[in-house]
Amino acid sequence: MLVLIGIIVGIMFFGLFTVFIGAPYVPTHRKQVQVAFDTLRPINKNDVVIDLGSGDGVVLREVSKRGARAIGVELSPIMLIISKILSVGNPRITIEAKNIWKYRLPDDATVVYAFIVSRDSVKFSSYLQKEATRLRRTLDVITYGSVIDEKRVVKRKNAHILQKFEPLQ
């Protein structure tokens, strides 16, 4: 019984811990993701989409259906396990247990997807600007719910926003 209580307390601790580092888990509906990838930034087999805070992996699975490679970055051990179970056997999906603030985007990343809360928008903008500059190319960034930087907004569709981060010289 004590072991079970310890496990539950541990799960709750990690769940709360991740909220303080980034955004809380908010499920994204597949239909909303499909609309975003159909209207804002079509995804194809040449894309490598990074989902920062990938939660249960719904974005990863939608990206892989479109033929692209999908990389999820998730800190919550619970969501990581759920995402890995739901994505088992899919060779286009990779899920990493990492803190997004310390994550370096892969050199071939083409699109970044994230649910971001407004309290983190300045920090997230700085992170993406550094990554675009390091990679020396434009990053297409789709956010759900919040704008990172209003001057970078290209298109909006419902709660999804496409923003572009250009490298600095």
Image (cartoon, helix red, strand yellow):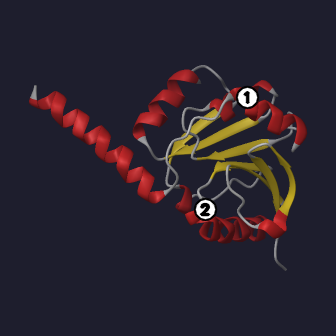
Badge 2 amino acid: Ser
Badge 1 amino acid: Glu
Q: Can residue 39 be seen in the rendering of this structure?
A: yes
Instruction: Tell me which residue sits at (69%, 53%) in the image.
Output: 106
Mark 1 residue element: helix
The quarter of the picture where residue 100 lies is bottom right
Q: Which mark is residue 20?
A: none
The crowd level at tag 1 (other Cα within 10 Å; few <14, some 14-19, many 20+) is some
What residue would you read off at disc 2? 118
Q: Can residue 137 be seen in the rendering of this structure?
A: no
Q: Nearer the viewer, mark 1 or mark 2?
A: 2
Q: Quadrant of the C terminus?
A: bottom right
Where is residue 66? Give x, y as percent. 82, 28
| Image height of 151 relative to 6, above or below | below
The quarter of the picture where residue 157 lies is top right
In-image side of 3 versus 7 (left or right): left
Where is residue 167? Give x, y as percent. 82, 71
Q: Quadrant of the N terminus?
A: top left
